[in-house]
Image (spheres, rainbow, N blue to C red):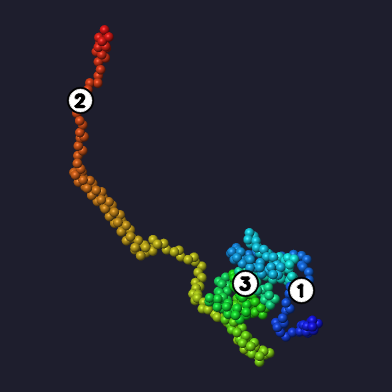
Amino acid sequence: MTNMSDEEGEAETPTGPVENAWAIKVPEFKKGDMKSHLLEESSFSVLFPKYREKYLKECWPLLQKTLDEYGIKPELDLIEGRMTVKTTRKTWDPYIIIKARDIIVLLGRSVPVEQAVKILKDDVTYELIKIRNMVRNKDRFVKRRQRLVGANGTTLKALELLTNCYVLVQGATVAAIGPHKGVLQVVRVVKDTMNNIHPVYLLKSLMIKRQLMQDPNLKNENWARFIPSFVPKNVQRKKPHKVRKTKKEYTPFPPAPTERKVDKEMAEGKFFIDQEEKKKAKKRKITEEMKKETSNRQKEKRAKAFVAPEEPKYKPPTAAVNTQVDVEALKRKVKKKNA
């Protein structure tokens, strides 16, 4: 029975050219297919930004649990900001280290761990599209990137439904995870969108192709007549009207000097009127100052009449005390007492 099954499996594998290569199922690499362990350790390291540190701490046990099934050891270094994956003696798939490297690359580009782990399957791949260098102008780049996302992410959601892929627009890159054919369609849509083709037209053509694939009569026909061709139009915008300057006639003489403000006032007669007004204003100011001084003097004179005179301060009468001492009389008095 085993020989018959082996002969049937060998008969199914194509040997010549294949019409639809996507229909061929890749044989699954199972545990036990590799007879011996790996001879040397392989490792890959990827740096991650600071803002991803909190999320990676939370999701790292889940990633460890997933990769332990394949014999891969993941390490997270928060001090250097580095993720590392290594092979061990328990690794039973030689290619799984490449897929583990792809997982940490996606985690560094803000892809959730639930989506990044999907690439461990054989029929799932990923693509990181760098879109910043496609458009030079920064404002134009932001507008086209927003056009790819759509209002509330509707355009991105429609693209995911039509291609069966997970698409994430983050900064200057777009990450796509899904089947090989779907990822190719996402790459084509992203590049055309950044080249100023609206994604609505591209999504419309994808929808038409999906409907045509369901019709068995049109399976082997050319679909070019059904898919609309969108020609980019360069719409000319109205430019601001420029006023043409008329050239002046050439004269060998230098231009006349510009008149001063005083010259213009003298020509109009305003200068002399202003001089007279200045003189009158000066006299008026002097007379007003003199009037103020005289009025202040009169007020001071009037105010003196109302000022009370200073009264002499009361001093109580003191008894006259003779402070002079008769020294000779005092001597005589002392002699009498001693005698």
Q: Nearer the viewer, residue 328 or 298?
A: 328
Name which quarter of the figure residue 148 lies in.
bottom right
Q: Are circles 1 and 2 on residues that touch, CB within 8 Å? A: no
Q: Secondary structure at mark 3?
A: helix
Which residue corresponds to mark 1? 33
Identify the residue under disc 2.
319
Tag of residue 267 = none
In front of the other: label 3 or label 1? Answer: 1
Direction top: furthest residue: 339
Mark 1–mark 2 Cα distance, whole angstroms, equals: 140 Å
Q: Residue at x 44, y 64 (%)?
A: 258
Task: Please name whichever residue, 114 or 22, is drawn nearer the observer in this view of the structure.
Answer: 114
Quadrant location of the C terminus in the rendered image: top left
| Amino acid marked by disc 3 | Glu
Q: Which residue is mark 3?
A: 114
Query: Looking at the image, is mark 3 or mark 1 earlier in the sequence?
Result: 1
- State the quadrant of the N terminus: bottom right
